[in-house]
Amino acid sequence: MKIATAETARWLSELEATAEELMNRHLAAAREWFPHQYVPWSLGRDFDGPLGGEPWRPEQSALAPAVRSALVVNLLTEDNLPGYHWTIGSRTSRDGAWGAWLHRWTAEEDRHAAAIRGYLHAARAVDPVALERSRMAHLAAGTAPELDGVLGVVAYAAVQELATRVSHRNTGRLSGDPVCERLLARIAQDENLHMVYYRELLRAAVEVDADQVLVTLDATIRDFAMPGQAMPGFGRLAAEIAVAGVYDLRVHHDEVLVPLLRALRVTELTGLGPTGEQARERIAAHLARTDARAARFVERRDQALAVRARRAGAD
């Protein structure tokens, strides 16, 4: 049961009109689409089991292992929708504009899972048995982010939705499959609209209490991790995704943190109090550390790939 606090009530009230305005803007910008139209059903055939079809074998997949890993992580993230729905609803409200957005967002995210799963099954892109076992294990773990109130939800979602958009887009681009790329590009469009909703809520919150927003944003980006920590084999999957360049520290810094902070004009805010100034300094320091770590990671990855290429040439 959610225990409403004065702080929660304050932010729900302060941002209610903006939430409604952004919801209406989202509905005007969103375009209806249907998962079944993006799935290559003509490639599908029965699997082994009650229908007596053909078992899945790795050679049936035309996708590179890293792309398969990225698709699995993306799908299992979408599958964990119940956890995110509960978390957002318990930190905000199920009434009014907040509730309307929560339910609309949930419906759109669920569409993403349906579309990706349909593609993976029809194209025999991944092991369907392993995928289902991973889904069961991930959802049964009941993992959801621990977010601090209304601002915590808005800040986390702004970062997460942008990160998800980038991950989907890069996965499709690297897949080498025009069908996969078209599907993930369509999903990325939804994720971008979701990001805009939360980013603009965050921008409105800055006008109310910039100090508190920066404190929350600082904590969010320092503690942020792509969802999926409870997924079976997540460490290996994440490493494959990073090495392939789907989502790594360089992507996180250049394509998520920097654009978001620039859009919020964090470095240009005036009239901050001591807590806001300190939070801004911590944000800048975190950004610099992430940039340095990203540079080291890319250098090591390039060196490893060069060694691998030389060995392959020698063979």
Image (cartoon, helix red, strand yellow):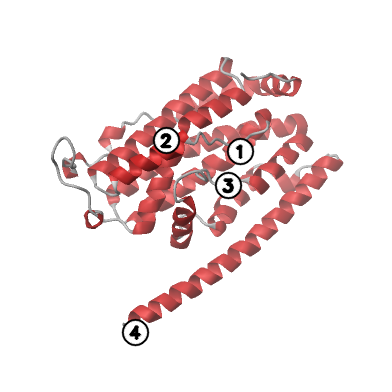
Which amino acid lies under the numbered mark 4 shown in the image of this protein? Ala
Front one among 199 and 44: 44
Give x and y (percent) for residue 284.
73, 53
Pick whichever of labels 4 and 3 is earlier in the sequence.
3
Which amino acid lies under the numbered mark 1 shown in the image of this protein? Tyr
Front one among 46 and 278: 46
Name the residue tied to disc 4. Answer: 314
Please give the label number shown on residue 243. none
- Considering the numbered disc 3 on the image, is that residue within a helix, a strand or a loop? loop
Give x and y (percent) for residue 156.
61, 38
Please give the label number shown on residue 225. 3
Q: Residue at x 66, y 24 (%)?
A: 15
Which amino acid lies under the numbered mark 2 shown in the image of this protein? Asp
Pick whichever of labels 2 and 3 is earlier in the sequence.
2
The N terminus - image quarter: top right
Name the residue tied to disc 1. Answer: 156
Nearer the observer, disc 3 or disc 1?
3
Whole-angstrom CA distance, mark 2 to mark 1, is 18 Å
Whole-angstrom CA distance, mark 3 to mark 1, is 10 Å
